Image (spheres, rainbow, N blue to C red):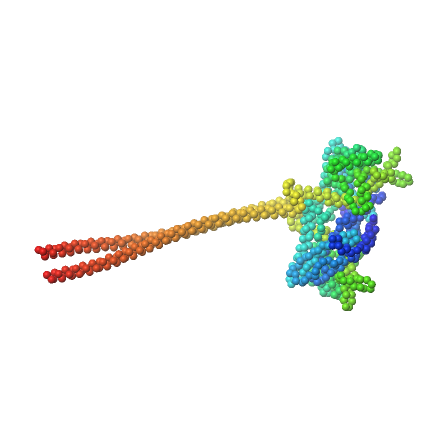
Amino acid sequence: CSWSEYSESIESRSKSCTSGSDPQQPKTLEAYVGFANLPNQVYRKSVKRGFEFTLMVVGESGLGKSTLINSLFLTDLYSPEYPGPSHRIKQTVQVEQSKVLIKEGGVQLLLTIVDTPGFGDAVDNSGCWKSVTDYIDSKFEDFLNAESRVNRRQMPDSRVHCCLYFIAPSGHGLKPLDTEFMKYLHEKVNIIPLIAKADTLTPEECQQFKRQIMKEIQENEIKIYEFPETEDEEEMKLVKKIKDRLPLAVVGSNTIIEVDGKRVRGRKYPWGVAEGESFKSEFVLFRNPLFIFRTHMQDLKDVTNNVHYENFRSGKLAAVTCNGMENKHNGQLTKSPLAQMEEERQENMGRIKKMEQEMENVFEMKVKEKLQKLRDSEAELQKRHDQMNRSILAQHRDLEEKRRQLEEEIATWETQQRILEQQKLETLKGGNKKKKIF
Amino acid sequence: MVEDEGEGARAVPLSGHVGFDSMPDQLVNKSVNHGFCFNILCVGETGLGKSTLMDTLFNTKFEGEPTQHNQPGVTLKSNTYELQESNVRLKLTMVNTVGFGDQINKEDSYKSIVEFIDAQFEAYLQEELKIKRTLHSYHDTRIHACLYFIAPTGHSLKSLDLVTMKKLDSKVNIIPIIAKSDAISKSELAKFKIKITSELVSNGVQIYQFPTDDESVAEINSTMNSHLPFAVVGSTEEVKIGNKMVKARQYPWGTVQVENENHCDFVKLREMLIRVNMEDLREQTHTRHYELYRRCKLEEMGFKDTDPDSKPFSLQETYEAKRNEFMGELQKKEEEMRQMFVQRVKEKEAELKEAEKELHEKFDRLKKLHQDEKKKLEEKKKALDDEVNTFKQKKTAAELLLNQAQQAGGSTTLKRDKERKN
């Protein structure tokens, strides 16, 4: 539906909304507030901004890639002035991009078509997907670097949003090259496989071919782009229709033919004309073969951004921060590299602190030991000193005692002497007296 | 803008309807399915009617008690509500400043607000920098609009207002509003608005301007820009006017109808904030305020975009350089620590040696003292011994003398006795 219808429907629906009181349900408002207008605001801004889309086409030469691109956008993206890669000489697989600016209904789209000339054309094709994967990775890398800059400006999104893979209409199954290529690329880009030049297959052959291809895709565990489920019934019908018809069989045409008075794009054969109307049935989608763009362009971009790019980014960042170490990383991936480095730093700081603490402890212990020893020896020396003091004191006392004794003795003796002296004196006196008596 | 990146792109006309004009619709559908989120911060003094205004704006009663004036500091309370209008789901977060303007010293009032806003930016930045990230399902809590409530004094902005707005204008989209504007008369209001606008301009405060670059809304936005700041009245009570119930405040002298554009600018605020520019507010927050924060944060951490030779760094190089820097720092720190320890050990050893030396000296001195004492003792002993000897000699001499005397006396007595006998 168009924008005006859409906004009208919002206005009318909102005016009749009821008030809800269920706490589990989001609160429905009592009267019109107006944020139901948000989608319109988003619409307006997106139209102003314009859109970008990068489409890659891969397939062997001569499968009608350029023709399809032209008929896809109903314009001559490749023209005599701007020839497509098929008209140019190439030796190895190159990746070439052309940018066009197209406008429709006020909406501007910057479309980048990435072509891969030379794919699968060599005799030895091993590794021919390398230039393709390198290209995709380099676009992811550009985006990653732009996103990681300090000064970020408008980031142009040149990542590959969709890859149309052309399968040659052999009628048998996938070639080894096909499976190899898809296995290398299914985790980097949304792959939509197509059967090219489907007007060379009968409807039955086509149906069988499709079944075989899908079987092989499943067996090889290749993840092609999954059209998302949606609540809209109309859309769901369309999605189911596409899913049943994968891979889509396409026929492209550069020429406009007149059929039943109408001018259509078609291919004229001697046996008839292959064009849109006759292929309206189940197996071939011709006119607007990729009407999926009407409904799924945004989703293709979202899957590229949310899944493929994020895978690339987490792989790249994990490699940077872990430097190839494999262990202990399940928990680490939920952090940013900066946070991780911060953590590492904290860990190391913690380690250093612990070391510091240990050294401190050892130091303290040693110092304590030494001090203790010192104290012990001090105590020892003090004890001896005290001992000596005591012994000296004792000796002093001894001496005092002896002196005292001596003095006592002297005193006694002196007293004795004096007595003796006196006795002597008296004896002498008495002797004299005796003499006198005679 | 797409045109800027179209280097080498040539415009090609289409010859039929391809169908990519549905891309905006696809984008809108995706957004609607995903749901929207919007975060409003209400800054203003207690009692200016912030909660009432929010209730009025969103036509619903959000929970909460009116706060008191006795808060010690400014805290931020946030509540998230899930609202729905037709098929649009909105996760609305309202953050209220509790206690703003209540303190005596209001110097630090703005700080908790700035910290809160920065914390939301930081959370987003951390998510964005994770290795395994889920940005598309991340609940964005960054503040998209800050409604600054100005008290209806009628004179001018308070200095607290100017200071706070100046601190916030580079971090968030500020929409100043005059609260409880039914307290101001029409003429005063016009003067008040002019005064406020001129004060904001002269102080260099950048308030949010409604964008005028999109033709479809340029006119209405520029008209509204000239009505800033909006003078609003909030009310959840309904009054019967004519035959309708309208939100109003009933005074004895009349009724102020909230949704009457002659009475107040409420309708303008609702129009601008919600119906016309909600998406632009979100965009500005993401592309201007958040980027500024991110840039400052990364520069603070030492990240640069180009090395001295002006060649751009790749992400890998930047991270490795950062990591090497950290490692280098750590090693240096380790070294320093070791050195410090070695130093300390040396010092301590020297100290202990000193102490030991002192101890030995002390005891040497003591020893010497002892020896002196001993010597003295010896001398004393010798003296005593000498005295003993002297005494002994004296004694011996005296005894000898006595003996001699006795012997002589005895012999004398004997002689006399002999003489007598004879």
| Nearer to me, A9 or A88 | A9
Where is residue B372 shown, x and y percent of the image?
Answer: 35, 53
At a point 41% along the width and 50% down the height, the residue shown is A380
Residue A359, how many percent across, how many down? 53, 47
Q: Which quadrant: the C terminus of chain A?
A: bottom left
Q: Nearer the viewer, residue A70 or A10?
A: A10
Q: In the rendered image, which quarter is residue B146 located in?
A: bottom right
Give the residue drawn at x 13%, y 61%. Answer: A434
Instruction: Please state if B369 lies on the left or on the right of A187 as rendered.
Output: left
The percent coordinates of residue A21 (x first, y second) are: 76, 56
Name the residue located 64 percent from the left edge and 40 percent from the top edge: A326
Kindly identify the residue that appears in the image at 24 percent across and 54 percent down. B392
Count how many numbered circles sit on residues in the image.
Answer: 0
Res. A89 visible in picture = no
Is residue B139 visible in the rendered image? The answer is yes
Residue at the limit of the structure toward the bottom, as seen here = B253
Q: Residue furthest front?
A: A22
User: Which of A333 and B67 lies nearest the eye of the viewer?
Assistant: B67
Residue B369 image position (x, y, % from top left): 37, 53
Res B210 → quadrant = bottom right
Rendered position, B8 above or below A172 = below
